[in-house]
Amino acid sequence: MLFLIMIGSLLVMSTVDSTSFENKLRLYDSFAEIHQIYNGPLRFQQATWDNIKHESIILRSASENSNITLSFERRIVRINTNNTGKTILVRKYSEQKSPTPCEMIKEEPEYSIVREVETGFYFRVQTDLIEYSYEPQTNQIYEVSFYPILSNHSLIVTYVINSLRWHARYTLQTFANGQTQFQILADIINSSPLSYNFNQTHLMSGDINLAFGNGKSSSLIISSSSSKNSIDYSGVHLFSFINNSIAIEPYSIITLPILIPNIRIKVLFTYTLILTIPLPTLNSPVSIISGKHKFQRLYQLSNSSSFLPTGHVLLYDSSSNVLTGEWHLPTLAESEKYEFELGQDPDIMLIYNRTLSVNQTTNSSLMKTNVLIQNYKQRKVNIRFKSICQLSMACLFYDNKLRPLGSRLRSDLIIEAKSEIAFTYTAMDKFDTDTYFEFKTYEEFRTARLKLNYDSTLKLWYSLPEGLPTSGDNQLVRRQTTRQQRARVRYMKFYAFYCTLLKKTFLRKKIQSKGFRLWNETLNVPALRDDSLYGIYQSMGHVTSEFLSKGRRYDPTISFEELFKAGRTVWFMIAFQMQLNIPLALTDSIFGYNMLYPYTDDLVDSNDISRESKKDFAKVFHERLLYGESTYDPKVHFDGKQSNANELDLPISLQPHADRIVKIFDMVKFIENDWVRGGEYEGVYMSLATIHESQMKSTLQHARIEDNYAPTMEQVEQVSAEKGGASLIAAGFLIEGRLTRAKMSYLEYLGFGLQLLDDLQDVKEDMKNNHRTIFTQTLADGKTLDAPTARLIRYCYCASAYEKFSDDLRTVSDRKSGVTLAHYVRVSMMMFSVVLVLEAASRLKEHYSREFYRELSSLSPIAFRDLRKARVEETMWRIVRNQWF
């Protein structure tokens, strides 16, 4: 087969570079590029050829200073390796002492035809009686040649192989005197049976997308599969140059130390104290809170020398010569700084007590905190102490001389060996968190809501550190061993069997009790009285069944999938009712709000509706939500029967879709049954208009190939935060009618988290539809999902998820633990969300690094191979709906 390749090469003026060109190797993290002098046709045996990316074989000038373009014709020929025409030695019978020289005429697997050199006679001989004076070739040989060859130029051939690669790893040693040593190691890996020798080796690093063909078929052999290959050389760095000969043995790993100066490591111990308003202060003007915590080890890396590729770091305490931790270092640019925390240190302790005084008249608080930091180590240590207020509070910090420090406190200290340091600081908070979020106009509502949304979502999102959380970040974080995960699966199966067998017997209550304990243990949530949980469980089942029945009564054509999609938010609204100590019931407004989702999605996402029609619908629906019908009468109660679509006054573009729009408007009528327009509950309709506005803005997330439009990550983050928060604040308004700023902040926070969960679950579908979320945008940028997934899990474990409100005490409490029902529901909801995040991630293994996926799986209550098949939401839906136990 003949290939014609045009190769642009730069030549040195008109003279020939007389310097001899030596074999070079450029190593990347998944392949290697070989440079070798070209003296004529190259021959590759099958084993070597299988590891070569055939499209990468090119010829160019050996000179590095050229300005002439050369064109070469490349030929690749597969040579059948047989011994026809070659001289061999044959024994005519096995006992013959001296073999007879013969010429191979026709070679066959069992018998071959040969001609005796001396007599010229032909005869057949068994293959096992043939001897060779050379090593016979049994595999195919591939010959690569280029034409024409210029005699006055030195040429080299380059090609890419996938059997050689390298990766960096690091060791960090800390010594008793506080000094550190950071070492870089380069592992050169040969996964083939071939040996290599190189005079020069370049270690390269960077993001290169280079695909190798499937299987071991050559392009000269007919294959049923073909692959597109693309190379992106942007962002590639030369990490290190080795100007020595290297011999690489088959199936081997060579580890080389790399010396790079000016990489400084600083070890600190850090802790962030979050100030909260305790519930007892609602009834008492003064309260005292105390606590004791261990500091986290923090490593600060300052890279002022060169680019550092990603790799694992092993940390050692050289004073006791033990391994103390492991971390995955991301890619670091020159002069970039990086910090990571790695576990608690029992030798550095924080002891504090805080006196909180509340002024009911001015609705403000004064928090005075006394801090004692103790160092039990035999050496001095660097300390970083920080203090911030919970999200719903607006604090100002002051030192012990009442000098202002801003909205957060940070102190960098040095504590000598076996000593301690004490200091005091004060924080003042004017908390208007219990004031209602109410405005006269929609524009005022919208402006204030967008600011609150950013403060409660993206501001927190951007501040989260990299990596997965640890138990030091939140006590609810729990790592699981493989044995623990397997044991939990066995227990779940055991429980399911006995539940099915015994749930209708006198052991029913015991079965129920064990079920609730299994829930609490699996999610790692605090315990609550079984009778409280069973009441919740029964009520959720009744509300779920009632929602499905009411949906089918209104619209017999609706599918179960659409009802399931609508019902996901029903459970959240039930949970919010529990937190507010409101009787659990399916109100008309809850039903109407949740049914809006399938009906509006059916219209907005439909491909058979023009862009003009959707624009008209956006305007009509926004006015319908915000202002209602012109004929609105608060005394009229909607009976739940579908309205007549012919009675709608719609623009011409929407009239063909009246049968869809009438259902949407009917859902608004359901909401109007519960919340009268024009009074103190106008926030209900302002929040609904906010949802619709956010949904229309989400069209910015669609990348369009036809006009080369793609959103930026900043746009995607903003739309996701606004859309997610809007859906839950509307749900909150529909339950309570009015919301405080604290609850608004909590719902904005929670809504963004649930939106990201939904986006992670839909990654594959969104990639097909060019819909950009934080996750699909990350993939479009050529990155793994490691960072956004870790950040989402950290987000779920933030303090906001476990916020306490002034009316929590109205709910049932467990006498032993003191846990209120409201707090239990909030914690359960977030821990269940974490499980759903892990379930979604378990199905996206190909989009994570191997190390991160393994670490992520340790957070799961059961093994990923079981979780990815569990279909957790649907299973829970069936259990609750059918009252399984």
Image (tube, helix red, strand yellow):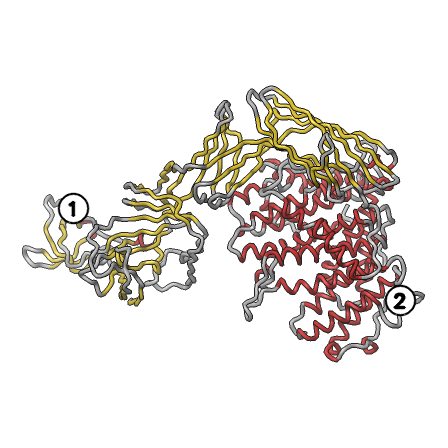
Where, quadrant-wise, is the N terminus in this rendering?
bottom left
Q: Residue at x 35, y 54 (%)?
A: 160
Q: Which residue is mark 1?
A: 94
Q: Position of residue 681 (x, y in %)?
A: 87, 58
Where, quadrant-wise, is the C terminus in this rendering?
top right
**Is 760 drawn above or below residue 418 in the view shown?**
below
Going by the image, does 623 lie left or right of 678?
Answer: left
Q: Position of residue 325 (x, y in %)?
A: 53, 32
**Is 414 drawn above or below residue 55 in the view shown?**
above
**Is 350 drawn above or below residue 794 in the view shown?**
above
Q: Residue at x 60, y 60 (%)?
A: 772
Q: Is residue 826 or residue 279 the one in the foreground?
A: 279
Q: Secondary structure at mark 2?
A: loop
Three-letter amino acid code of the residue under disc 1: Ser
Which of disc 2 and disc 1 is earlier in sequence?
1
Three-letter amino acid code of the residue under disc 2: Asp
Q: Secondary structure at mark 1?
A: loop
Task: Count the marks.
Answer: 2
